[in-house]
Amino acid sequence: MKRKNIIIIGAAGRDFHNFNTYYRNKEEYNVVAFTAAQIPDIDGRKYPSELAGALYPNGIPIYSQDQLPELIKELQVDECVFAYSDVSYEAVMGVSAIVNAAGANFKLLGPNSTMLKSNKPVISVCAVRTGTGKSQTSRKVIETLLEHDLKVVAIRHPMPYGDLNAQRVQRFATVEDLKQHNCTIEEMEEYEPHVARGNIIYAGVDYADILAEAEKDPDGCDVILWDGGNNDFSFYKPDLAITVLDPHRPGHELKYYPGEVCLRTTDVAIINKVDSASEEAVEIVENNIKSAIPESMIIKAESKITVEHPERIAGKRVLVVEDGPTLTHGEMKLGAGIVAAERLGVKEIIDPRPFAVGTINDTFNKYQHIGNVLPAMGYGEQQLKDLEETINNADCDAVIIGTPMDLTRVISINKPSTRVHYDLDEITKPNLVDILKDFIEEHKLVK
């Protein structure tokens, strides 16, 4: 039997999951390569043989997506599978055109082919775009369940940018675990808010093994919470699906892959940030929800912002540092830090570009839509150094840190700084408390 040659087009996340769940043990397929995009310096590695399985004793090479046309021809590829998220339909079909022009088929795998089933009740929290407020929604779900004395284990969408075999299954229970696993800033931004509250969170590469470990977590597990990344759909079949939408980007819920999949498969749609978006934008998003999935419940919520030391920034010239992915492939021009600065009446929000060095300067050149805000890029040691130098070069009185993790824990800032925190505050009924009460009763989780 001639095996069909496959390339999986990814970004160190969904691509590995699609391979593990759909291709790994099927003799009719031969995955000849992965390609990598979105994240710096994740190509040039191998998907190791220990993870790839018996059909791939030498592992599978990972190339840059820029090499895709040549790879299709050189490796006699029959089919390319697109497997990363937070991508416009125009961009997805642009990749499809490249694949088809090189002679190969273009494919998207759906939930039925890739979702795993848990023996615990599963709640998924997904989003239509990066930076909608999914993490604060996950925290609200967990805190509500904890009030019912339930043991909740969160499982986060993958971000395996280092040693893939070492990252097969990762468990984070303390801030020290973040250092032990050599987490990037992006990883810490997602994991730290959980562990700082005493929650257990898993992540890694092999999500069947991760699920098995989470279900038997030593601290107990009553409910699995899928904390989705980018705008990807869940790796696990949810019993309750929640999707967060952002009225700062109205219409994107119907224009990005696979965010629209998350929307069209949700039970609960949360329109977040209604306090800082226009009424017209909120109405556009609400109408799109009703059109796409009229049976879903709609919650409107504010992204409640608090500042640790407002006196350090009021009336001052400030540099604002925001979550990196939200600004880069999330295409946002602002975040919680900018909102806090405007509400507290800073004198000036400075432009970070004149002070940018190295890889941070490269980021600004690549993502020219970014406003007067500094993306907290830190995928590797050099980027972290460049971020620190850029901040310390800046001609300003103070720094506003709008990232979900404590940036001062990993870099030294030579001027006064303050953190901005944000939490989900629902303003309509039914809210998550009501919905989760029904979920608990339905799954007989009452203790």
Image: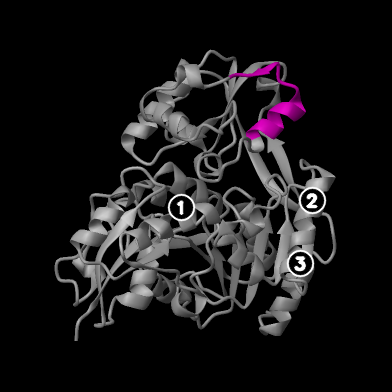
Looking at the picture, how far across and down is residue 226, in whole percent?
54, 66
The amino acid type, in three-letter code, at marker 1 is: Thr
Looking at the picture, how far across and down is residue 328, in whole percent?
51, 40
Upstream in sequence: badge 1 or badge 3: 1
Looking at the picture, how far across and down is residue 77, in whole percent?
26, 67
The answer to if 297 sits in the magenta stretch is: no
Secondary structure at numbered mark 2: helix
Q: Is residue 261 visible?
A: yes
How packed mark 1 is, by other alpha carbons closer than 10 Å (few <14, some 14-19, many 20 or more), is some
Residue beneath disc 3: 291
Q: CA distance from mark 2 to mark 1?
A: 38 Å
Residue beneath disc 1: 174
Residue beneath disc 2: 282
Of the residues tagged 2 and 3, which is closer to the observer? 3
Is residue 129 positioned above or below 75 on the image?
Answer: above
Upstream in sequence: badge 2 or badge 3: 2
